[in-house]
Amino acid sequence: MTEPVKDAVAVPAAPTPRTNGRPATQFVRPTFAGLQRPSNGSINADESNSAPHPAAQRDPSRFAPRVAQRRFIASAFAALCLVATLIGVVVLAALLIDIFRDGASRLSWSMITGFPSRFADRAGIGPALAGSAWVLALTALFAFPLGVGTAIWLEEYAPNNRWRRLIEMNIANLAGVPSIVYGILGLALFVRVMSLGRSLMAAALTLALLILPVIIIASQEAIKAVPRTIRLGAYALGATRWETIKHQILPVALPGIMTGTILALSRAIGEAAPVILVGALGFVAFIPTNPSDQYTVLPFQIFNWVSRPQTAFHEVAAAASIVLLALLLSMSAIAIWLRNKYTRRS
Amino acid sequence: MTAPRASLPTPAHDSRSWGEIGLEKRHSNERRIGILLIAASAVSILTTVGIVAVLVFESIGFFAEVSVWEFLTGTRWTPLFESKSFGVLPLLMGSLLVASGAALVALPIGLASAIYLSEYAQDGVRRVLKPVLEVLAGIPTVVYGYFALLYVTPLLRTVWPNADIFNAASACIVMGIMIVPLVSSLSEDAMSAVPRSLREGAYALGATRFEVATRTVVPAALSGIIASFLLAISRAIGETMIVTIAAGATPQMTLNPLRSVQTMTAYIAQTSMGELPHGTVEYRTIFAVGLTLFCVTLLVNMVSGVVLRRYREVYE
């Protein structure tokens, strides 16, 4: 199939060196390769230097479109790609069915509000759910202003200098740091140095740092999308930079910022690895009431139950997973709703 | 700017014009805000500094007791045993085994999905499939871990009855599926950026869709595709919960995916759950392994960035 393409490319290139056998003397080119080897005095001398394009040698009558064969390959490939795409869908379905089959029977109000127990049939996720809610709120409290502030600075204030490029590169790199490394940072910095211990506060600070790059990048995109004319209009009316941002840019960019923030927060409450390091507990028999309390969160509770050998605990883990998935799905739904509302307006 | 005017002082007792009123206040406000925003953006720098400082500081303590050479070349990792051995290679091998297994699953599926979504799918189909793949990316890793241990592993063991209960293969498969959306969405973005004229040129020469996809679009988007591969691999190396739950806790140098292995991330997670006394060499292994993990993922991410920047084909 490349044959026709190659031929097509070769056609304009081939005739240029050939000059229909005119004598070499007509050329006035001092560094011409042919002049150094005047063996036959013709232009063919330099042709022997560079091998002609294979397409130029080929017999044109041998062009074989092989249309039927190529069409077959094309449709086979299309089917293959479709199958590959569907693998993702099928696995997602298998995962959801598996979780629901294992956990649906254990799902009940008393399980959602109950406390963990040594006995699987009495174990509940109350403290874990409360812990996740606390972590969600505190993480948002830290990460949202920092993330949006950084994005505003980068988009509206920062001169296009080395410091700004450094920060942007740094944010891109932070986004690729494994979540467990943030856990190590939290363990050393928040749990030990700031001696917050195994508290909700330590977990929330760690997760806030984890999702900060995501919020910054999403907010930058949202701010970038605000038309320049709005800025210019505000400045023309005498508004200062911050007044323009506060009254004109942020209101327009807010839905986009919120969408990014909600998605980032849903990542934060789905994470188990960093909270393992900052000391979530597998067994918390009380509802945390302030940020310095010990805690557990839903993903960690699930992990704790999955790691036990008893099948009964696996069922509770599946039921807890259903709750977690429902929570994340509703957060994504809010984010998607916001995004759609936003895109329709502009 | 009508809103702030209400808070401005009335000009009756003031000889200045409306425009001058509150100007100083507004300007000092402006400076304060600027400083606050710079402080916010400094947090991201401080995070990086914090990560590097913490990892390096504790690792220095670790390497005071264990030689760097032993750490990097030793083939036994038994820091919690009576006879201690601190060779990180088994953990590194475990991470690479699982990540390459995951890549083997994710790269072909992800690339084929991206080709399908960008070259074949009609708008309606794309509108359904893309959110489904996004959901796949949003599932918590601990749920994937559950799925790997309690669904995929039993399935594997019906085919290979001698596979360990905790084995690398189930972690590879599930992690591969987890990173498919990353590969497919980034690759699709790269392919969508290939201009229409290139495709139409190929079609005009008589190419089929397969030929357009594989000989025109994929080569043109290659830098983006390879960058997405590398990012996915780095994500797989850094992924913790799936391997902690499903791949086991046996640090060993094996290429057999049916055996139990321990990755760097799983070691960190599993070790930090036990109460390790602060300041001991066992505690510091977390940081030394963390530093290794950080360096490996950073390296892969940076290569990905270089590929993206240096080999990008730019079209008008």
Image: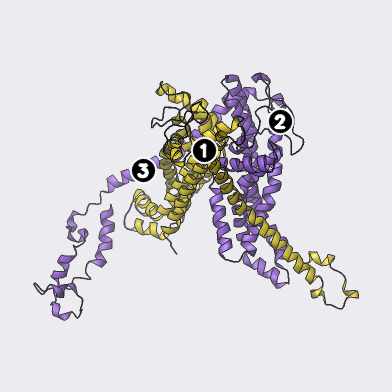
Chain colours: A purple, B yellow
The CA distance from mark 1 to mark 3 is 57 Å
Name the mark nearer the viewer: 3 or 2.
Answer: 2
The CA distance from mark 1 to mark 2 is 41 Å
Between B247 and A220, the one nearer to me in the picture = B247
* Residue placed under numbered mark 2 in the picture: A127
* Residue placed under numbered mark 3 in the picture: A77
Q: Position of residue A190 (x, y in %)?
A: 66, 42
Q: Residue A42 falls in which quadrant of the image?
A: bottom left
Amino acid at the residue labelled 2: Pro
Secondary structure of the residue carrying tag 3 is helix
Which residue is the extreme one toward the front? B64
Name the mark nearer the viewer: 1 or 2.
Answer: 1
How crowded pointer 1 is (Cα within 10 Å; few <14, some 14-19, many 20+) is rated as: few
The CA distance from mark 3 to mark 2 is 51 Å
A67 left or right of A176? left
* Residue placed under numbered mark 1 in the picture: B65
